[in-house]
Amino acid sequence: MIDHRSDLGKNVLGLPLVLIVEAKQNNFSKDWGQCLAELVAVQALNEYIQHPVYGIVTDAEVWQFGKLENKCFTRAPTRTTINDLAKVFGGIYKTMELATTK
């Protein structure tokens, strides 16, 4: 989980922004289900459903990116592989950029 620093100190979560879930046994469908459940929980924790939260599911070789805003989940249509590091880092950078600008 990547979040904003809390004003209450390092032992209190800030506003969660991005969740990263490990894809187990390359079962991305199941792991997106886990990620989506965590994104819904983060929205409840944030107490602001309109604030988008972002998820990444990866098995370290394949990377997929998604977003939950309100009750609408969207996932990037393409998978990015570690063979194209520029796209992986670009996806992570863009996700972090979007997460911190809202």
Image (spheres, grey):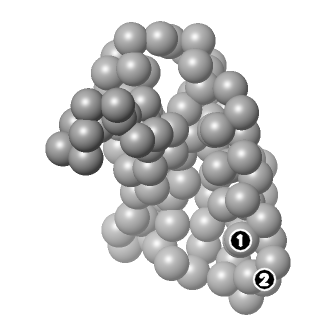
Q: Is residue 31 visible?
A: no
Mark 1: amino acid: Val
Compared with 100, 97 (above or below) is below
Tags 2 and 1 touching, CB below 8 Å: yes
Between 18 and 71, which is closer to the camera in this rendering? Answer: 18
Mark 2: amino acid: Asp
Residue found 46% across the figure and 40% down from its top: 4
Measured from the top left, where is residue 83 in percent x and y?
Answer: 73, 88
Residue found 60% across the figure and 25% down from its top: 52
SS category of the residue bearing label 1: helix
Between 11 and 99, which is closer to the camera in this rendering? Answer: 11
SS category of the residue bearing label 2: loop
Residue 76 numbered mark, or none: none
Q: Which residue is mark 2?
A: 84
Q: Which residue is mark 1?
A: 88
Compared with 64, 63 (above or below) is below
Quadrant occupied by the C terminus:
top right
